[in-house]
Amino acid sequence: MNGDDFGRLIYLVLLGAVIAGWFFMQNRNSLNKTLQHAAVWGLIFIGAIAVAGLWNDIRSTLNPAMARFEGDGTITVPRAIDGHYYLTLDINGAPVRFVVDTGASDMVLTHDDAERAGLVLDNLAYVGKAQTANGIVEIAPVWLDRVALGSIVDTDVGASVNSGDMGQSLLGMRYLQRFQKIEISGGELVLTR
């Protein structure tokens, strides 16, 4: 805070004190009621400041932005309120929501998402192992006939199905490396094909 800011602050404090003093002097006969009204107006003022300061967060929570698909093969994904990036891909005709995970080697499907995508879980062979944050899990390699992200369609895409409980399917580097450019900047993930 420089000298000018400090001077402005002193001026505003003094001005507020003079106005508050005048207000209390005018209403000294009903001081209790005056204090109640002042407290209510103070809370309204603090609430307005809080809403103004948090407006971008409130707006993104109430109206989360969706991925934007450009005609040149660019996909812009806004960061979600939890700090992650989410994409919904069409897997064999079924919409599957993924969390983008550049730390994951593979595209990994949950049991529910694999089943919704038409994979028969009883036919899967869990012959691979993967290191996760929760330890080592068995995975079953699979081939997905069709994977679509907007107008971008890939066929015969390799993926895995996790044997353990997983809350969200992961969109790892095996799929992301199909893009020429991956950029995270300004709260957005930009994929360019």
Image (cartoon, rainbow, N blue to C red):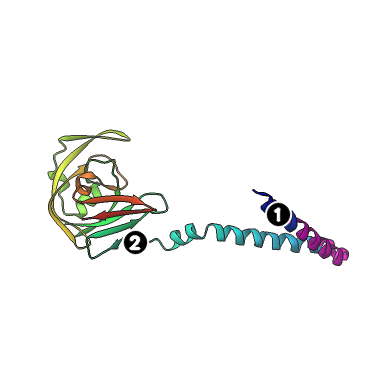
Which residues make up the magenta segment?
Answer: 13-32
**Eyeballing the image, is 159 above or below 59?**
above
The answer to which of marks 1 and 2 sits earlier in the sequence is 1
Pointer 1 residue: 9
Horizontal side, residue 73 vs residue 99: left or right: left
**Eyeballing the image, is 175 above or below 55?**
above
Pointer 2 residue: 66
**Marks 1,2: beta carbons within 8 A:** no
Residue found 27% across the figure and 57% down from its top: 88
Horizontal side, residue 69 vs residue 24: left or right: left
Residue 53 image offset from top left, x and y in percent? 55, 57
Q: Quadrant of residue 50?
A: bottom right
**21 is within the stretch colored magenta:** yes
Element class at badge 2: loop
Residue found 53% across the figure and 57% down from its top: 54
Compute the Cα span from label 1 to label 2. Answer: 42 Å
User: What is the chief secondary structure element of the magenta stretch?
Assistant: helix
Element class at badge 1: helix
**Eyeballing the image, is 187 above or below 31?**
above
Q: Amino acid at mark 2?
A: Met
Residue 18 image offset from top left, x and y in percent? 81, 61
Q: Quadrant of residue 150?
A: bottom left
Horizontal side, residue 126 vs residue 34: left or right: left
Q: Residue furthest right?
A: 29
Q: Amino acid at mark 1?
A: Leu
